[in-house]
Image (spheres, rainbow, N blue to C red):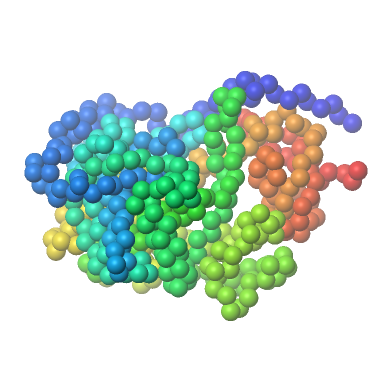
Amino acid sequence: MPARRPRLAPDRAHDELIDSLARLRVDLGLPTAFPEEVDAAAARAARSVPTDPALAGRDDLRDLEFLTIDPAGSTDLDQAMHLERTATGGILHYAIADVPAFVEPGGPVDAEARLRGQTLYAADRRIPLHPVVISEDAASLLPDRDRLAYVWRFELDDGARPVATTLRRAVIRSRAQWTYTGAQVAIDAGAAPPTLQALAWFGPQRLEREAERGGASLNVPEARVVPGDDGGYRLEREAPLVVEDWNAQVSLLTGMAAAELMLRGRVGILRTMPAAEPDDVAAFRAQTVALGLPWRLDVAYGDYLRALDRHDPSALAILDAATGLFRGAGYVAFDGEPPTDPVQSAIGAPYAHTTAPLRRLVDRWSLIVCEAIANDREVPGWARESLPSLPKIMGRSDALASRLETGTLDRVEAAQLAGREGRTFDAVVLGRRNGTARVQLTDPPVAARVEGLDAAAGTTVRLRLTSADIATGEIALAPAPAP
């Protein structure tokens, strides 16, 4: 029997991981800083753009008590909301950072943003779309500061359906920056401010509307890289909090409203996804039967997924399979004839990215186009003419973001296991393809592929760790011999 390799000391594993993540960024060709002329242009804009409503020519909405809800530590705040109940439903004001006010079309900041496409997130840093003087200061909807914003106003009926929608540029002032955890605790304790109390009505209503239109929120437990107690990084794989789902519904409503405006105005850019192929749906349904959690014909796809117990190993395997049903998401720009199929099938409606302009390039165009259409004005020529370039820019950026995310997760997962070679772990089999099983370890929550594992999806198995290479992120596991 080979000798077990001693577990790496925390500081050594940390150092190896930091070096590996740095090499990954180099290998992907990620930028390390903004060019001087870009930083200078951003600083000038941050200093010169007025936030006084009269000087800026904006509506004054500073009397509304907006708040933000974001992950802990966030400083690039794209969205703020004010939600109030009425006798017939509610009124939602949703403020989106007015990035166009700080980015001159064709200028240095615009040109660099078109190269980057989106903010990229690594374990140990983020690579922002815009210089931080804009993205984390002047344009960010930080609390207790006057900020420029595009403000969507939705009049909602008792089912949180929009019955009237407007979009205006305004000056707002957020009152508080909430974390998801803090917001959930306040709501559960009955100590939340009015907007969060109203969100607890809005969220469930919008989830019901999602079910009606055939949309599906997977809510798959996501792997998150978080700082560890030893100064390194560790993995968490937890389902989102309920308030995260409710907050996401605000963004979804806005994205669907943006798509409706664009289709009405016959110009814009949509986020589309084709419907799942019938053969894939049939195969997925058969898999649910094999796993003992059959998807009945009289139950909608989204309702079935929402009812699954996220702690059931068979449910985890089903959710993993469900992520493969919907493929081919992309962007479609149009000017004149709308797309033949404008629907984002997982959402169950036409949809546009429009709520994250600090972190995603395409959202800046969406806001500009929608605000013009909503107020019966011509879409600016520069925005209209550059729409066809956006799908390629965003496609390239999405691919890079995916490679960074995958490479980062692989390396952090390897660091979690390094030094434990020879040990055995419990794991759930998520699925099999071409003789290779996809598994997720119970602790730590590492996902991996295992050659030669003859076990059905949804079963629990014992695996022995053969190797874990932090430098490459490669992990080798094998079926553990019977005791």
Q: Where in the figure is residue 56, as x and y percent of width and height?
A: 12, 43
**In the orientation shown, which residue stands out farthest toward the left?**
54
Task: Answer above or below: position of 291 versus 111.
Answer: below
Q: Quadrant of residue 70?
A: top left
Q: Where in the figure is residue 413, as x and y percent of width and height?
A: 63, 37
Instruction: Report the side of 120 relative to 94 (left or right).
Output: right
Task: Answer above or below: position of 188 versus 456.
Answer: above
| Rendered-image quadrant of the C terminus | top right
Q: Nearer the viewer, residue 328 or 288?
A: 288
Q: Nearer the viewer, residue 15 or 218?
A: 218
Q: Quadrant of residue 459?
A: bottom right
Instruction: Report the side of 130 relative to 22 (left or right).
Output: left
Instruction: Report the side of 214 relative to 355 (left or right).
Output: right
- Residue placed at 83% from the left, 43% from the top? 480
| Residue 74 in view of the camera | yes
Q: Where in the figure is residue 111, as x and y percent of width and height?
A: 26, 40
Task: Answer above or below: position of 326 versus 425.
Answer: below
- Residue placed at 32% from the left, 45% from the top? 67
Count of numbered marks: 0
- Residue placed at 41% from the left, 64% from the top? 206
| Rendered-image quadrant of the N terminus | top right
| Residue 345 in view of the camera | no
Q: Where in the figure is residue 387, as x and y percent of width and height?
A: 27, 55
- Residue placed at 86% from the left, 29% from the top? 2
**In the orientation shown, which residue stands out farthest toward the bottom?**
298
